[in-house]
Image (tube, grey):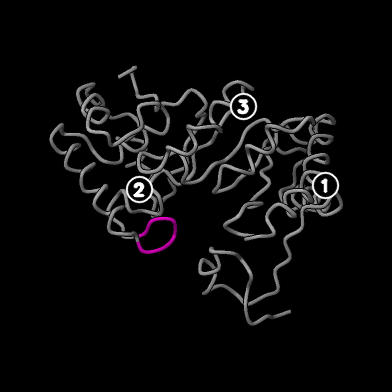
């Protein structure tokens, strides 16, 4: 069925050029069972490593996000916990662009997720909020984080978008300060961004994304690049990162 508009919170523009099909987002137990069964059939396997419960947050669901979260809590979360116990999946977690749904999940007196995929909220540009509550909770519960969107929609590495839209002047100014500092130390901005995100003890992996195959090689090289301690020390002293943010090599 085709529809004229899509209600996707402040992320509606992401799909403006996609097919205008009717989209149903459902996190009930029955829908979760169907999704897992269909995925196993399509992949031709009998188990899955990780299942992410995506986008039960404010940016996709607006004022209804808590209602959607409750649907997932009583449906998807419990179903995935059972499937984990049965060995159908090895792990499950949340994949979101906001910290609040993960904080709520970690505070539940129910079977807990094994990790989470947090996009855009633990980057060299945007990390203050995640450090306040979420990451201490995750560290205390020994729950790992996959860092998504470390370049914040590309603005850190030459693009003009932050959070999927045109970057504000203050964001662009901050990026220029970071690039200038990195340039003085001979450090690639990709290396600074990726290594910052991976320095937190909770960070298990990072997903930078790639627009073409050559970008993957660049990202691997950036993770392996030697970054002098003096860079991290000046980064901290300049106030461009939070005093609470762990830096590589304890800088």
Which residue does the numbered mark 1 point to in the structure image? 75
Q: Give residue 85's position: percent from left, percent from top.
A: 83, 29
Examine the image and state in which quarter residue 181 appears. top left
Residue 222 is covered by the magenta coloring: no
**Alpha-carbon distance for marks 3 and 1?**
21 Å
Across the whole image, how many numbered discs are drawn on residues? 3
**Looking at the image, is 157 positioned above or below residue 14?**
above
**Alpha-carbon distance for marks 3 and 2?**
29 Å
| Residue 157 placement, left or right of 74 | left
Q: Secondary structure at mark 3?
A: loop
Q: Give residue 73's position: percent from left, percent from top.
A: 78, 43
Residue found at x 66% / y 44%: 52
Q: Give residue 74's position: percent from left, percent from top.
A: 83, 44
**Looking at the image, is 238 positioned above or below residue 52?**
above
Q: Secondary structure at mark 1?
A: helix
Q: Secondary structure at mark 2?
A: helix
Nearest the viewer among 77 and 98 is 98
**Looking at the image, is 48 positioned above or below residue 228?**
below
Which residue does the numbered mark 2 point to in the structure image? 215
Which label sits on residue 143?
3
**Dot in front, 3 or 2:** 3
Q: Are marks 3 and 2 in contact (CB under 8 Å)?
A: no
Report crowding for label 1: few under 14, some 14 to 19, many 20 or more residues within 10 A (C-alpha). Answer: some
| Residue 7 placement, left or right of 67 | left
Q: Quadrant of the N terminus?
A: bottom right
Q: Give residue 120's position: percent from left, percent from top.
A: 46, 46
Report crowding for label 2: few under 14, some 14 to 19, many 20 or more residues within 10 A (C-alpha). Answer: few
Nearest the viewer among 128 and 119 is 128
Mark found first going from the N terminus, 3 or 1 = 1
User: Which region of the structure is painted magenta?
Assistant: 161-166
The main secondary structure of the magenta stretch is strand
Q: Are marks 3 and 1 in contact (CB under 8 Å)?
A: no
């Amino acid at each position: 069925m085709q529809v004229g508009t899509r209600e996707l919170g402040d992320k509606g523009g992401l799909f403006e050029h996609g097919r205008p099909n009717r989209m149903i987002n459902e996190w009930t137990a029955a829908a979760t069972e169907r999704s897992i069964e269909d995925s196993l059939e399509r992949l031709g396997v009998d188990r899955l490593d990780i299942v992410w419960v995506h986008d039960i947050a404010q940016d996709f669901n607006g004022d209804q996000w808590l209602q959607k979260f409750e649907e997932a809590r009583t449906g998807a979360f419990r179903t995935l916990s059972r499937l984990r116990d049965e060995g159908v999946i090895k792990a499950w977690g949340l994949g979101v662009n906001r910290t609040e749904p993960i904080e709520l999940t970690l505070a539940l007196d129910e079977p807990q997720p094994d990790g989470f995929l947090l996009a855009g909220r633990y980057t060299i540009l945007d990390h203050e909020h995640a450090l306040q509550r979420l990451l201490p909770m995750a560290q205390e519960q020994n729950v790992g984080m996959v860092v998504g969107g470390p370049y914040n929609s590309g603005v850190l590495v030459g693009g003009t978008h932050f959070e999927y839209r045109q970057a504000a002047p203050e964001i662009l100014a901050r990026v220029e300060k970071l690039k200038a500092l990195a340039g003085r130390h001979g450090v690639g901005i990709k290396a600074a961004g990726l290594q910052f995100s991976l320095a937190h003890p909770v960070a298990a992996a990072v997903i930078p994304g790639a627009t073409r195959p050559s970008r993957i090689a660049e990202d691997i090289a950036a993770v392996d690049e030697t970054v002098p301690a003096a860079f991290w020390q000046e980064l901290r002293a300049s106030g461009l990162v939070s005093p609470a943010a762990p830096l590589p090599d304890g800088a």
